[in-house]
Image (spheres, rainbow, N blue to C red):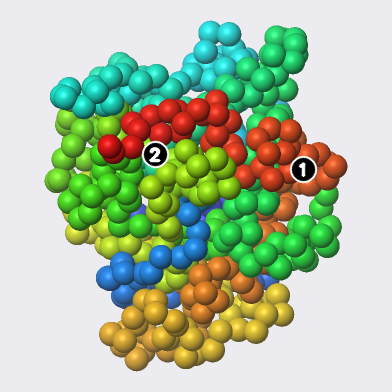
């Protein structure tokens, strides 16, 4: 099962970067016949590589970033945190991962290992593929959907199995972990409940689009391909007009989409894209700082501090990181046969009105209030200092609960060290951006407190700031939105990956949404279409009396 981890990076024209048996950075060239089978990473500027920093600095910096977890709320609804995670998995989904023994051409391999906004994590290789047809209903048009498990008791809203609100699951296998595994192309989309429910929403969105097209008399032989095209285009529209301007200063987004790219593959139009490590390993890890410690999840889990959707429980009630069964003990998540539930309990279905803003719609859709994502800055929610092992293949490693390798910030910084990622200062120089001052790097604006760093390590940090930390500090001093280096990297890569998609609103700028509110189509519109316009599907557990 694929976990949310990257052990090696094949960088075009440079070879493979990874760690040796002692955990030290290592570089080698793959065999010629293996090269096309590597996911294709790149550098925005191949001449700019950063120095490898001391492990002590990476560890101390990671501890400082996860020590407090008291970042203030930002102005972005919390659901966009996990839409961003869903997007990340779409961009790094390897379409050929299960095809290593098949007779495919080099062109097919290269195309299958390059990033594009085409929802491969939702569709896999399509219903006609002999292995991926298991993700589809028998008609080969609609996607499979799961059913939640009733929770016995007096609450009639949760004492019922609800079809359409869980991922489809295997239901069989040698361990309970295998039985509860999600039947979706990318198991990373079940590593926490929020991204899993986002994937469920996209399954329902596809199935509703199929219904709309069928009602328009689209022939059944064409129905899947037409539905996928419309789903992908509406998804891209949401990213371009709703998600991207929320995380990146809109002036940067407008400049890129109006005038094109300046730094990432600026002269390339169409064809396979590559994935720059400056984006994948650094800039687009901005979402890690948006994660909350806890969410007012639905009417059952909405009472702080004891009865709410804590971040730990969002891991617990997933199939990849968790057990779908309640526990307070992180060690239970490492046990493949822990727990009784093989499906999501009904009382954990999300109320989408709490994660996205529906205030522009009719009053019944407004809901009790929206959880806001944490401000984009250099602080991560404290629970991220110790990830569940299932989210990154740590079960196989047998890591202790306090091992620093469970710290998400450390893992991010270590990856950057591994691939010799350019520093923030190097990227600012390349892009002609005013670099952060030494004082801004040291103190920021209410973010990570670096006062305990020894002077020697602080000097390293100020001189060669890891790009991920730099981008977050840059956002921190810009009121919680990417600007400068981070904003430019994210906006340009989004533009390139839309351009490279088989269905592209960049290459077809005249296209406009026809679902929801047309050109005003947002993630809230997408969720309403997925819910078939019904409040009981948007919030199936209802509200408290």
Closest to the observer, 457 or 121: 121
**How far across and down, in percent of the image, does residue 355 sit?**
44, 47
The residue beneath circle 1 is: 505
Which dot, 2 or 1, sits closer to the camera? 2
Mark linked to residue 351: 2
Please tell me which of labels 2 and 1 falls first in the chain: 2
Residue 110 lies left or right of residue 206; in this view the side is right
Q: Residue at x 27, y 58 (%)?
A: 383
Residue 160 lies left or right of residue 448; in this view the side is left
**How far across and down, in percent of the image, does residue 275 sit?**
63, 52
Q: Residue 128: name its quadrant.
A: top right
Q: Is residue 121 at all visible to an observer of this figure? A: no
Q: Is residue 153 above or below residue 332?
A: above
Q: Residue at x 83, y 49 (%)?
A: 269
Helix, strand or loop under label 1: loop
Q: Is residue 51 above or below residue 539?
A: below
Residue 8 lies left or right of residue 176; in this view the side is right
Helix, strand or loop under label 2: loop
Q: Residues within 10 Å of mark 2 (few under 14, many from 20)?
A: many
Q: Residue at x 33, y 31 (%)?
A: 541
Q: Is residue 252 at all visible to an observer of this figure? A: yes
Q: Residue at x 23, y 59 (%)?
A: 403
Q: Quadrant of the N terminus?
A: top left
């Amino acid at each position: 099962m694929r976990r949310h981890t990257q052990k090696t990076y094949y960088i075009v024209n440079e070879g493979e970067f990874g760690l040796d048996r002692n955990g030290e950075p290592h570089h080698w060239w793959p065999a010629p016949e293996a090269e096309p089978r590597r996911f294709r990473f790149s550098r925005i500027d191949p001449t700019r590589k950063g120095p490898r920093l001391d492990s002590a600095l990476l560890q101390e910096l990671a501890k400082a970033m996860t020590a407090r977890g008291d970042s203030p709320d930002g102005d972005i609804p919390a659901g966009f945190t996990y839409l961003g995670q869903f997007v990340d998995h779409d961009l790094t989904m390897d379409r050929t991962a299960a095809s290593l023994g098949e007779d495919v051409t080099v062109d097919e391999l290269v195309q299958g290992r390059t990033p594009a906004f085409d929802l491969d994590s939702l569709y896999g290789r399509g219903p006609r593929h002999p292995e991926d047809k298991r993700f589809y209903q028998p008609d080969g048009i609609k996607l499979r959907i799961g059913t939640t498990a009733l929770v016995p008791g007096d609450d009639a809203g949760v004492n019922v199995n609800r079809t359409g609100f869980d991922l489809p699951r295997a239901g069989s296998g040698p361990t309970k972990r295998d039985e509860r595994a999600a039947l979706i192309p990318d198991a990373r989309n079940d590593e926490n409940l929020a991204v899993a429910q986002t994937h469920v929403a996209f399954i329902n969105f596809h199935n509703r689009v199929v219904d709309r097209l069928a009602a328009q008399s689209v022939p059944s032989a064409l129905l899947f391909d037409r539905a996928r095209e419309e789903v992908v285009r509406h998804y891209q529209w949401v990213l371009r007009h709703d998600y991207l301007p929320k995380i990146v200063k809109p002036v940067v987004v407008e400049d890129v989409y109006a005038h094109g790219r300046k730094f990432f593959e600026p002269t390339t139009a169409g064809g396979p894209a590559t994935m720059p490590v400056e984006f994948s390993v650094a800039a687009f890890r901005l979402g890690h700082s948006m994660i909350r410690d806890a969410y007012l999840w639905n009417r059952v889990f909405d009472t702080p501090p004891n009865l709410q959707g804590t971040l730990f429980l969002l891991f617990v009630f997933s199939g990849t990181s968790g057990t779908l069964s309640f526990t307070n003990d992180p060690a239970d998540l490492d046990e493949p046969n822990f727990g009784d539930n093989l499906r999501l309990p009904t009382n954990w279905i999300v109320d989408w009105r709490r994660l996205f803003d529906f205030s522009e719609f009719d009053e019944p859709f407004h809901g009790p209030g929206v959880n806001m994502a944490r401000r984009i800055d250099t602080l991560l929610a404290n629970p991220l200092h110790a990830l569940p092992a299932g989210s990154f293949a740590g079960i196989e490693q047998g890591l202790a609960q306090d091992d620093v390798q469970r710290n998400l910030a450390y893992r991010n910084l270590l990856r950057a060290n591994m691939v010799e990622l350019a520093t923030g200062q190097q990227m600012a120089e390349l892009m002609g951006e005013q670099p952060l001052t030494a004082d801004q790097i040291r103190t920021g604006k209410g973010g990570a407190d670096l006062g305990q760093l020894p002077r020697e390590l602080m000097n390293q940090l100020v001189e060669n700031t890891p790009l991920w930390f730099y981008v977050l500090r840059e956002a921190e001093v810009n009121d919680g939105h990417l600007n400068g280096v981070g904003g430019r990297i994210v906006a340009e890569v989004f533009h390139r990956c839309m351009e490279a998609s088989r269905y592209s609103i960049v290459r077809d700028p005249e296209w406009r949404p026809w679902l929801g509110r047309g050109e005003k189509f947002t993630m809230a519109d997408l969720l309403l279409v997925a819910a078939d316009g019904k409040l009981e599907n948007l919030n199936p557990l209802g509200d408290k009396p």
